[in-house]
Image (spheres, rainbow, N blue to C red):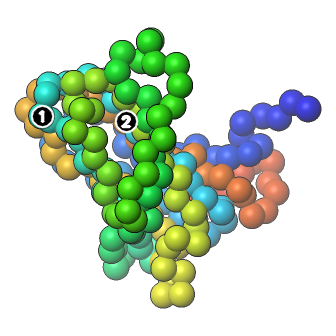
Amino acid sequence: MSQNLLDMCDIVSGIVPINLGSARTGDTISLRNHGAVAVVFFKAAGSASEDPTLTFEQATSITPSSAKALTAVTTIYTKQGTLTSVGTWTKTTQAAAATYSNTTASENEAIWVITIKAEDLDVDNGFDCMRVTIADAGSVNQLACLLYFLLEPRYANEAGISAIIN
């Protein structure tokens, strides 16, 4: 059975390709109509000791009002090195946290994938939105971008359901 990727998920730009020489704030998305999101971070090689740190926040709206830490980052899949020579994913686990960084990432090309479930947000208090920020990673050009792959749509809709509105 053949399935189109967009039948299974929606793709939203979190951070457009940009130099990580300054802190970057990703767009906020709503998980109200999706069961999970795979956050995909993709970067070029930079200089040693300028490792990017991703910080996850949750909010009550896409504005994002009342943003607070989203301490649900436990499993990270990475491909890191010269990506033409890295063929498999490496699974890393950590204690639940709102951040992820890798101390050997800066000098390598990298793809990181972190999945957050909608139920990991503080839904009891109205938190159904999230965003990712990237701390200043240093002065050397290190291009990166971030995409949100919204998974498990709650409702069938051929055109998809927007994740950038409440």
**In the image, residue 67 above or below residue 145:** below
Front: mark 2 or 1? 1
Residue 105's x, y, as percent? 27, 33
Picture disc at residue 97:
none
Task: Report the side of 21 relative to 113 (left or right).
Answer: left
Quarter of the image for the N terminus: give it.
top right
State the CA–CA distance, disc 2 to disc 1: 19 Å
Residue found at the very far top of the displayed protein: 84
In terms of depth relative to the viewer, which is nearer, 134 or 78? 78
Task: Residue at 50% x, 83% y: name it.
Answer: 126
Task: Residue at 72% x, 58% y: name it.
Answer: 153
Q: From this viewpoint, is residue 13 visible?
A: no
Q: From this viewpoint, is residue 91 visible?
A: yes
Q: Quadrant of residue 156?
A: bottom right
**In the image, residue 31 above or below residue 50:** below
**In the image, residue 151 above or below residue 13:** below
Q: Quadrant of residue 85?
A: top left
Tell me the residue that label 2 is attached to.
145
Residue 41's x, y, as percent? 41, 39
**In the image, residue 139 above or below residue 66:** above
Residue found at the very far left of the displayed protein: 139
Residue found at the very far right of the displayed protein: 1
Q: Label 1 is placed on what type of residue?
A: Ser
Query: Could you tell me how many numbered marks the image carries?
Result: 2
Quarter of the image for the C terminus: give it.
bottom right
Task: Residue at 80% x, 48% y: name it.
Answer: 158
Task: Report the side of 8 relative to 149 (left or right).
Answer: right
Residue 124's x, y, as percent? 54, 87
Judged from the image, the secondary structure of the residue bearing numbered disc 2 is strand
Q: Earlier in the sequence, mark 2 or mark 1?
A: 1
Picture disc at residue 49:
1
| Label 2 crowd bin: few (<14), some (14–19), many (20+), radius 10 Å | many
